[in-house]
Image (cartoon, rainbow, N blue to C red):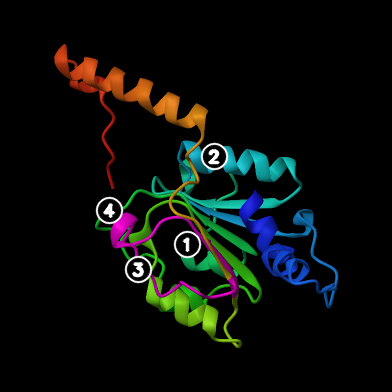
Amino acid sequence: MPADRSLIRDLPAHNAALRQGRWRVPAAPAVELSEMTLGIVGLGRIGLALAGRATALGMEVQGLSRRGPAEAPVPPARSLGALLTTSDVVSLHLPLTPETRGLIGRTELALMRPGAILLNTARGGIVDEQALADALRDPGHPLAAAAVDTFDHEHAAFASPLSGLPNALLTPHIAGMTRTAMATAALHCADHIAALLTDRPDGVPVVTA
């Protein structure tokens, strides 16, 4: 979990200070990952893989599944609000649908545990970017930092109110851009095309809300 570890340890600020020749000592020791609770919103393949890695690092993990708590393979939160109020790190792993658009807005951000971190490597529209930016600018807000890889407007149209905020770690939709991931995606695309050409629509996955 490099993104949240970077924010927990304030690594971007330490890097910037040393590049400027300043020895910046933390005001207080950082919290161990094993002392933190990770809340995962969306328990599909990626969410479950994250749960396994976080558990291996000693984190307490809870999740929220669109399929309901009875089918959750990790300890389920009662609701989104309950997950937000009891998680130190919240990671989003949902598709963008009419039901998930704007899922995390001002009301939800205000519920987060003091000092919490939000991670969004899913889809930009799931989080209200302006509400997130306002929360990160407010020193009295419980949200301490966010790592965001997906945005409402991307590529040449990129624009975000999160730009320039020191407690926002922003990356250009590259979380899944590795050689292995790209090769696997290409093979899956080929399989799906073959399924359609051979009249096997059941071989093509469809995202449902």
- Circle 4 or circle 3, nearest the eye: 3
Residue 146: in magenta span: yes
Looking at the image, do the residues carrying marks 2 and 1 touch, with CB atoms under 8 Å apart? no
Labels 1 and 3: the sequence-earlier one: 1
Label 1 sits on a secondary structure element that is: loop
- Determine whether 200 is above or below 7 in the image: above
Tally the numbered discs.
4
Instruction: Give the Cα distance between marks 1 and 3.
Output: 32 Å
- Determine whether 189 is above or below 47 in the image: above
- Residue at left offset 30%, top offset 25%: 189
Q: Tell me which corner region of the image, top left, top right, bottom left or bottom right, holds residue 166.
A: bottom right
Nearer-the-camera pick, 142 or 190: 190
Dominant secondary structure of the residues highlighted in magenta in the image = loop
Three-letter residue code for mark 2: Leu
Question: At which x and y percent is residue 41?
Answer: 48, 54
Q: Is residue 37 visible?
A: no
- Residue for badge 2: 48
- Residue at left offset 46%, top offset 77%: 133
Q: Tell me which corner region of the image, top left, top right, bottom left or bottom right, holds residue 27.
A: bottom right
- Report whether 91 appears left or right of 31: left
Direction top: furthest residue: 198
Instruction: Give the Cα distance between marks 4 and 2.
Output: 20 Å
- Residue for badge 3: 159
Circle 2 residues within 10 Å: few <14, some 14–19, many ≥20: some
- Residue for badge 4: 97
- Residue at left offset 65%, top offset 50%: 2
Residue 96: in magenta span: no
